[in-house]
Amino acid sequence: MTDVPRPGVLNTIKRLAMRPHSLDDAGVRNLLARQIVRFSFLGILVASVVALFVAKDKEEVARLILASLVPLFGTWVGTVLAFYYAKDSLQTATDSTIRLVGKSDPLSPTSTVMIPRSDIEGKKLAAGDDPNTLHLTDIRSDMEAARRQRWPIFNADDEVTYVVHKSTLDAYFAAHPSESAPPTVASLLAMPSLASLISAIGFVKPTDTVSLARTVMRSVPYCNDVFITASGEKNGPVLGWLTNTMLANIAS
């Protein structure tokens, strides 16, 4: 004799089959969770009543029910519920990882992923100061103290003039192990290969996309730094900063 599913089970199956598009994933999981818990409780209740009703040794049967059926149904309910809720847990963990790693949408505005000006470490000049007179040894000391690999130089209007990378300083000092006068930024500018490195800067607006920032970086030879200004031009206070490392960590 073939077992006939109970009406409650049939109704649940019909509801899921006839409304495949009326419930989202969360709705389906909620419906299944309620039905699974309900049928598991009813299953334990029915099995217990039937077993106790027909058994001669009711005490032994009750012990067997508690020792076998209850853990069985409990494990089944826990496994099924964990399966349906695991998707949300995994998605939440993935979203958290994405935020930490910085894998943003390439169509996101640069303002949402940039380093804000308040968090940028570098050299801010006073009015009338000439960036070309900055000593390279002082720049290197500041970078080492801040544990930074690149050092932006801003004028009094908060416009970026140069970005000095540690690799650029290393190349200069390797080529000039000893000099009578302290080397300055002007010393870097006197070497065309190094001058192009510290001046290789791109600019975009806060509303420009990350994808456009990548394009700008590629369009400037040796560029590893893109700064965000209100106009997207060099002449304007810096609002934020995107490095080549940051752009590389954003999904294409």
Image: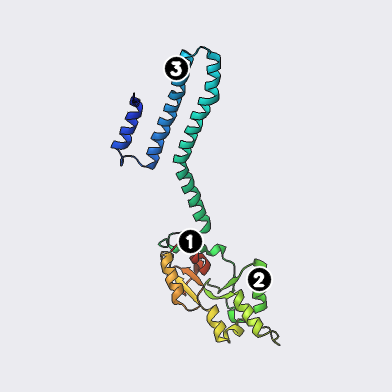
The first of marks 1 and 2 along the sequence is 1
| Residue that appears at 41% across and 36% down | 30
Horizontal side, residue 154 vs residue 81: left or right: right
| Residue that appears at 41% across and 65% down | 209
Badge 1 is on which residue?
A: 113
Of badges 2 and 3, nearer the viewer stands 3
The secondary structure type at the circle numbered 1 is: loop
Q: Nearer the viewer, residue 206 or 36?
A: 36
Of badges 1 and 3, nearer the viewer stands 3
Q: Can the viewer see residue 204? A: no
The furthest residue to the top: 56
Badge 2 is on which residue?
A: 142
| Residue that appears at 51% across and 53% down | 97
**Residue 150 in the image, given as x and y percentages of width and height:** 59, 71
The local crowd at label 2, few if under 14, some if 14 to 19, many if 20 or more residues have their Cα within 10 Å, is some
The local crowd at label 3, few if under 14, some if 14 to 19, many if 20 or more residues have their Cα within 10 Å, is few
